[in-house]
Image (cartoon, rainbow, N blue to C red):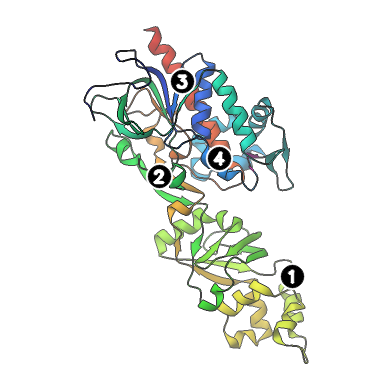
Amino acid sequence: MTDRVTDPWREQGAEPLTAVVIGGGPAGLMAAEQLLLAGHRVDLFDAMPSVGRKLLLAGIGGLNITHAEAADAFLARYAESSPQLAPMLSSFDAAALRDWVHGLGVHTFVGSSGRVFPQEMKAAPLLRRWLQRLRSQGLQVHTRQRWTGWHASGALTFTGPSGECLVTARVTVLALGGGSWARLGSDGAWLPWLQQRGVAVQPLRPANCGFEAAWSPILHQRAGSPLKNISLNLPWLSMPARKGECVLTQWGLEGSLIYAHSAAIRDRISTQGRAEIVLDLLPDMPLAQLHAALAKPRGKLTLARHWQRIGLEGVKASLLREIVSESELADAAALAARLKALPIMLRAPRPLDEAISSAGGVAWSSLTPTLMLQAMPGVFCAGEMLDWEAPTGGYLLTACWATGRVAGQAAADWLATALSR
């Protein structure tokens, strides 16, 4: 790399770029929008051939943009980071987010679970209209430009198709994502670069992820089968069991019910080396009723047909046989108890790159309330690279948009002050 600070998008010797946003996901695009609204030129850099790739992937099965629930319940989803996120989510809550989406000409609806979706369900129409508006406001997008940290001069360093270059900027917003789905650009490579600049960071860990269990080869044959209408309890926590469904995989369990508890399960494994969860395979049938049904003589019925009379079949029956001893299977009382409280030992989370999202990142202690790095005035952070986590269900996207909005507005204010000097 040359030691001369150059800018490949302007003539040599020109003034530094006004505002640089690095990362073209929801947080980065929202930060760029705020800077544009304040009248500043914005150059957005992204390592991928196009922006918003993880957003598009998230929208394949229906883009869940937010959740329509009471504000206190919504905020509680962010657990330990609720105090820091509260003012940002208050100023850009689910209702404000929906209004913003409607402003793009995209209609939304609330599903039966309270989740909010675009009318067309997909992410592509929303992203396309958003980019059209941003470009009409003057956004300059530079793709295939991978940020690689800072030069000794303080300039931003990038690697792209034409090689390496240096870019100077008056203000910078980092929206680099976490560490999941590296092939879409979120690889967490930025952690050591911030650490070298005196920024405190927490290690990236998988969130909203699956977990590994030691299944037998017989149960491997059931991989991909859904476990529907079950409930899950974490016996080491004082919390009610939660109903839902998950999926049995060759390596363990994944799916919405597991993701909802992934932070607690991951932390338990971290401290104890393993985590024993408890499943109720028939949550709608009380223990006494279940015992009575199992105790009925089965006559010429096979055990499998006998179980079918209470709705115990398929992957549920296979999982039961995996865990429960033959003597317990033959004892109605013991079997009923197991069906209502089946222990599953989880041994490790799946790799970070497979997770839907990640925990860890830039520590709140390193940031001002408006998301500027205390060690680097004029550099702001937003989105999943901050140290917070939340379950799926629109909470991840809402916080990315909300933090991007705050970082962009604060960067615009910083610029206004700097340019007036």
Q: Is residue 211 above or below residue 301?
A: above
- Is residue 271 visible to us here? yes
What is the chief secondary structure element of the magenta stretch? loop
Comes first in the chain, label 1 or label 4: 4
Quadrant showing the N terminus: top left
Q: Which residue is mark 4?
A: 55
Q: Amino acid at mark 3?
A: Val
Quarter of image, res 155: top left
Q: Residues within 10 Å of mark 3 (few under 14, many from 20)?
A: many
Reading the image, the residue beneath label 1 is: 285
Rounded to the nearest angstrom, the CA distance separating label 2 from label 4 is: 16 Å
Q: Nearer the viewer, residue 125 or 177?
A: 125
Label 1 element class: loop
Task: Name the N-terminal-most of marks 3 and 1.
Answer: 3
Three-letter amino acid code of the residue under disc 1: Met
Q: List the residue tagged with mark 2.
A: 187
What residue is rendered at 34% in x and 41% in y?
A: 191
Magenta region, residue range? 63-67
Mark 2 or 1 closer to N-term?
2
